[in-house]
Amino acid sequence: MRFRKHLELERGQKEINITPLVDMVFLLLLFFMLTSSFIVLPGIKINLPKAVTSEVIKEKNIVITISSENVIYLDERPITPSELTNFLESTVKKNDERPILIKADKDTQLGSVVKVWDICRKVGVFQINIATLQEVQ
């Protein structure tokens, strides 16, 4: 079998057209970008303080979040202290015995945490926990 040393292109054509190649690469890129899933965690960005003696809580809690700007959130929606009081009073009336978990940013003012803690105790909730990160010794 004889091979030619130089492959001759069609008459009048001096170079290879790479447009279809670029089109296919673009379509593949588009396909992979549209079919891949990006994980976006919704929620309020807070930096929890670290504690060596923290424990893992496995029961369902009512989560109250306090951001570094001292904004209070209940189930990831902003809430005023009076609305928080009304919500907690209604849960106590329903005999909802879930404990409260306060997730406060480490840069939050202590007064905001104490205010939320005081609201909880005033309405009759005495199972109150503060969320922390476990620090490895």
Image (cartoon, helix red, strand yellow):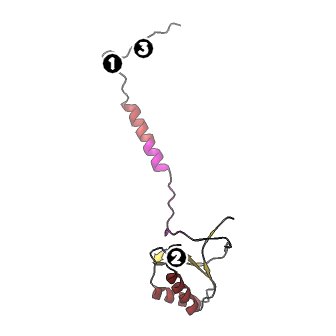
Count of numbered circles on the image: 3
Question: Would residue 86 be found to the left or right of residue 26 on screen?
Answer: right
Query: Would you identify the image quadrant in which residue 94 lies?
Result: bottom right
Q: Which residue is mark 3?
A: 7
Q: Where does the image place residue 125, in percent across and percent down from the top left? A: 60, 88
Q: Which label was assigned to residue 65?
A: 2
Q: Residue at x 58, y 90 (%)?
A: 121
Determine the secondary structure under disc 1: loop
Which of discs 3 and 2 lies nearer the camera? The answer is 2
Quarter of the picture holding the C terminus: bottom right
Whether residue 37 appears in magenta in the rendering, the answer is yes
Q: Which residue is mark 1?
A: 14
Q: Where does the image place residue 122, in percent across and percent down from the top left? A: 56, 92
Asked if one can make out residue 98 in the rendered structure from this viewpoint, the answer is no
Q: What residue range appears in magenta? A: 29-47
If you read the primary sequence from the N terminus, does the residue marked by circle 3 or circle 2 appear first?
3
How packed mark 1 is, by other alpha carbons closer than 10 Å (few <14, some 14-19, many 20 or more), is few
70 lies above or below 115 = above
Q: CA distance from mark 3 to mark 2?
A: 71 Å
How packed mark 2 is, by other alpha carbons closer than 10 Å (few <14, some 14-19, many 20 or more), is many
If you read the primary sequence from the N terminus, does the residue marked by circle 3 or circle 1 appear first?
3
Q: Which label was assigned to residue 117?
A: none
If you read the primary sequence from the N terminus, does the residue marked by circle 2 or circle 1 appear first?
1
Q: Where does the image place residue 21, in percent across and percent down from the top left? A: 41, 32
73 lies above or below 31 = below
Whether residue 83 appears in magenta in the rendering, the answer is no
Q: CA distance from mark 2 to mark 1?
A: 68 Å
Q: Amino acid at mark 2?
A: Thr
